[in-house]
Image (tube, rainbow, N blue to C red):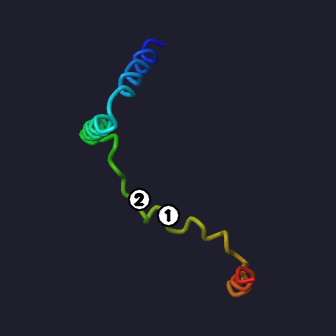
Amino acid sequence: MRKLATFEIIEREIEKLKPQDQLKLVERLAHQLRKTGLATKKELDWNKLYGLGKGLWKGEDAQKHINCLRQ
């Protein structure tokens, strides 16, 4: 419960800052998170997706499906 109270105090103080100062703070926090590795964008491994939907179209006529979509 104490951490929540601390977070709320920090949040209130941030709201008192000018918008450009808030933006500077966000940039600094993002920089810190990137250094820790929490905010890094992870690449999608397309090889893991190979064959996932192969059973979805079993028995389905491709041309019939396309014709239905076009209607």
Q: Of the residues under marks 1 and 2, which one precedes in the sequence?
A: 2
Is mark 1 in CB contact (under 8 Å) with mark 2?
yes
| Residue 46 x, y percent position in the rendering | 43, 65
Q: x%, y% of residue 40? A: 32, 47
Amino acid type indicated by mark 1: Leu
> On the image, which quarter does residue 51 sit in?
bottom right
User: Quick one: SS at disc 2?
Assistant: loop
Residue farthest top in this picture: 2
Does 46 sit left or right of 63 as displayed?
left
Position of 22 with respect to 49 (left or right) is left
- Residue at 75% across, 81% down: 68
CA gap, disc 1 and disc 2: 9 Å
In the rendered structure, the answer to whether residue 42 lies left or right of residue 5 reads left
Quarter in which the C terminus is drawn: bottom right
Examine the rendered structure and indicate whether residue 1 appears above or below residue 34.
Answer: above
Residue 29 at x, y = what percent?
Answer: 29, 35
Instruction: Say the numbered circle drawn on residue 44.
Output: 2
Q: Nearer the viewer, residue 18 or 66?
A: 18
Question: Residue 56: horizontal and vertical position, in percent?
Answer: 67, 69
SS at badge 1: helix
Residue bearing mark 1 = 49
Of 31 and 50, which appears nearest the observer? 31
At horizontal 27% and vertical 42% (from top left) the residue drawn is 34
Q: Hey, what amino acid is under mark 2?
A: Leu
Question: Mark 2 Cα within 10 Å, few/some/many (few <14, many 20+)?
Answer: few
Report the disc number at residue 1.
none
Task: Please give the name of the residue rendered at 28% of the width and 35% of the height, measured from the top-left corner.
Answer: 21
